[in-house]
Amino acid sequence: MAQDTLFVQFYSTKKKLILESHIFAQDRYVQLTDSVRNPEYFLQNGFSSSYDYCKNRGDFFWIHLDFQYSEEGLRKDIDLIELPIKSGKVYVSAFFNMHLLCTFLLAQKYPNIDFIVGGPAVEDSKFSGVLPTNIQYTTLSVAEFLGEKDGDSSWNIELPRELDGKVFLGYTLERFCYWAKCNFCTYPGPNKKREFLRTFVESLAPNGSYRIFLNSPALSPVSVRKVVPQLVSLPNIEYWAHVRSDPQVYRILRETLQEAQDNGVRLSSFYPVNGVEFPSDRMLDWMKKGMTTKLIQDTFVLFHEFGSTPLMALIFGWNNLCAKDISQARLFFKEMSDLVDGRIFVKCHALAAKVGTELFDEVEGLGEEIRLGPFLLGRKLPLNKDQQMLNDDYHRALFEAKFIYINDHSKNPHHDFL
């Protein structure tokens, strides 16, 4: 093992994210505070799939970096980070854009260390400034960059010792989106799959509590059909995954969930995350989502039939809405809530045009740029008075539907760019 080589991964706490969370109780929404939530930790464990390969070449090193709402706050936290080496090589798994900024600043702080950065946050279109000469970015995974072959590693993880609550971590299944047509999204590419080994949970400490995200921008129908019936059900484990409500998935969903149930999979611990974005058929068509409001409802109802609670992701800040969109969204929310008795988790995002997307190209030169250090991440779309009012109506319609849980970041487009 090289004593001057580190494999850096990040983790954060969930404290910063709960102030926008609302639970529906006693016919009203109650906003959460730190005092009503047990500690939770979000691990961005990008090297777990290449554990053996990396372990034989260096030491794993965790960096605790929480979400902030300003670049200034991030820079202050990053300035406190100390690496255990002063020279050598540091390989970084960058899951979020804030990891790009962190590595950029560390490369300045440690000029005698060569930094090699890979992971899903790395996209060539983001680089718009001068970078230190001791940093290299790759759109490959770091293990692929080093020459890892399939079968060189087994999945594993060494948890940070200081964790004392529920751990949210990832198990990577697919690298790109099989659909890859949405006009606001940035995950096109060959949909490389990793073999799913259901026994990976045996490497987790049995006395811990885990939320495992089956990493993929959107699980392909092939992976849904293969993986869900193989999940290992344990009382201390939840599974989460991005699952689309499209015809390809819906076609195989009932038989998949039935087989999982027959295999003893506790589907109440499986949480499908579904990007609805805006529930009107006109907007879904404009976004190139490849789904309809009726198909979304049918998919959610089917998950509920087998005991799963879906999470619905919505986007606010659209600049092309019409009154008919709001009417259909309001009706969708009401019908959806009635169909499943409100048992849907909702997460609200704020729209910005991300670099590398059709939407970004369409709004070139318009709106406020969103940057993080030398990285251009996107543009905030300008809204006129009428569009702002329509988005406000959309927001009100959501809260009128009385879903059990809403995490609301609809006013802060910078949040999704961390």
Image (cartoon, helix red, strand yellow):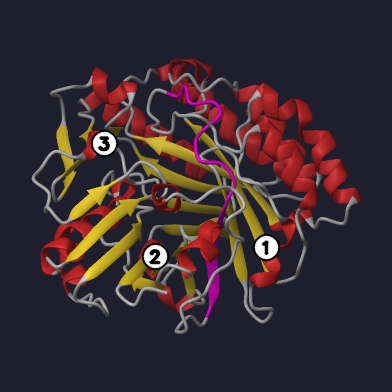
Q: Is residue 70 visible?
A: no
Q: To which residue does mark 3 refer?
A: 124
Q: Is residue 113 left or right of residue 415?
A: left
Q: Is residue 168 magenta?
A: yes
Q: Secondary structure at mark 1?
A: helix
Label 2 to label 1: alpha-carbon separation: 19 Å
**Among numbered discs 1 and 3, the one appearing first in the sequence:** 3
Residues rendered magenta in the picture: 165-182
**Mark seen at residue 200:** 1
Q: Secondary structure at mark 3?
A: helix
Residue drawn at x 29%, y 52% as measured from the top left: 418
Residue drawn at x 43%, y 44% as measured from the top left: 348
Q: Does residue 190 lie above or below 128 as drawn?
A: above
Residue drawn at x 67%, y 82% as measured from the top left: 207
Residue extending farthest right: 262
Q: Does residue 189 lie above or below 15 as drawn?
A: above
Residue drawn at x 38%, y 72% as measured from the top left: 62
Q: Secondary structure at mark 2?
A: strand
The amino acid type, in three-letter code, at marker 3 is Asp
Q: Nearer the viewer, residue 390 or 374?
A: 374
**Mark seen at residue 9:** 2
Residue 100 at x, y = what percent? 26, 53
**Among numbered discs 2 and 1, the one appearing first in the sequence:** 2
Q: Is residue 131 visible?
A: yes
